[in-house]
Image (tube, helix red, strand yellow):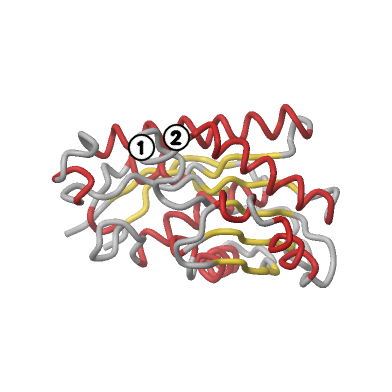
Amino acid sequence: RQLIVAFLLILPFVAEAPAQGPRILWIGNSYSVGQPQSLADFSAGLGLAAPISHQNIIGGATIASRAATPSAMAGILAGLSGPIDVVVLQGQSLEATTTFSNPTAFVSDIETVFQAVRNHSPGARAVLYQTWARGPGHGVYTGGFVADPATLHAQIRTTYTAARDNLNAVFGTGSAALAPVGDAFAAAAWDPVLYAGDLSHPSAAGHVLAASVLVEAIREIAAREIPIDFA
């Protein structure tokens, strides 16, 4: 079965690729496992210099846990060989929802973590890796916690957008961008091909879709909407 997904992809004609890609710090959990490599592969396919990725990707970790432990954040940043250009911030999959968590706290915790990053790398930009609703048939729906993927997606989208807007208000316009990966999953109607067997984590196709959205936000390159065949 074929899936044709319309999503934002950078223009394939890049005037001149830089000799070195951006230095990226990834702060996330199991949803981000493998995503730095997917981004590197996707960038290479577009003729872009590979990013230099530093990872703090820990299964089950939250933005809140990083914000609550300044010493841990200090340790993460002290381990870097120099300043970074971009920090990718990905919260636990339900951390930005109103049903399961506290969106106001999420927005505040994102600010706290980014402040620590800015103390280390004053020129760093934040890219908020918007996660996606769990796939149709997941227990969050069958268990009656949330009506459907559209409802869960709306909660996640609203909170990540608020977090981006807050960073730009606090640190200045252009300090933060949203990588709306969840929107891309929604555009694909949460097709099961995008999910691993747990209907939560991304499949190989889900990683490709995420990379296509992340590369636009990270590289700040103009985009257009085209179809992709994941069959």
Above/below status of 56 relative to 15: below
Above/below status of 18 relative to 122: below
- Which corner quadrant of the image does residue 76 belong to? bottom right
Circle 1 residues within 10 Å: few <14, some 14–19, many ≥20: many
Find residue 79 and report its horizontal and vertical position in percent: 77, 72
Task: State the mark number for residue 177.
Answer: none
| Mark 1: secondary structure | helix
Q: For the point 54% across and 59% down, which residue is it?
A: 28
Quarter holding the N terminus is bottom left
Task: State the mark number for residue 157.
Answer: 2
Q: Amino acid at mark 1?
A: His
Find residue 217 and report its horizontal and vertical position in percent: 61, 46
Relative side of 230 to 136, left or right:
right
Find residue 83 and report its horizontal and vertical position in percent: 83, 61
| Mark 2: secondary structure | helix
Circle 2 residues within 10 Å: few <14, some 14–19, many ≥20: many
Query: Do the numbered discs 1 and 2 sit on residues whose CB atoms are within 8 Å?
Result: yes
Relative side of 17 to 96, left or right:
right
Quarter holding the C terminus is bottom left
Q: CA distance from mark 1 to mark 2?
A: 6 Å
Q: Which residue is mark 1?
A: 153
Q: For the point 42% across and 40% down, which residue is it?
A: 101
Q: For the point 68% across and 40% down, which residue is it?
A: 111
Towards the viewer: 205 or 30: 30
Find residue 39 and report its horizontal and vertical position in percent: 55, 63
Towards the viewer: 51 or 75: 75
Q: Amino acid at mark 2?
A: Arg
Q: For the point 72% across and 53% down, which residue is it?
A: 15
- Which corner quadrant of the image does residue 202 belong to? bottom left
- Which corner quadrant of the image does residue 105 belong to? top right
Towards the viewer: 49 or 159: 159
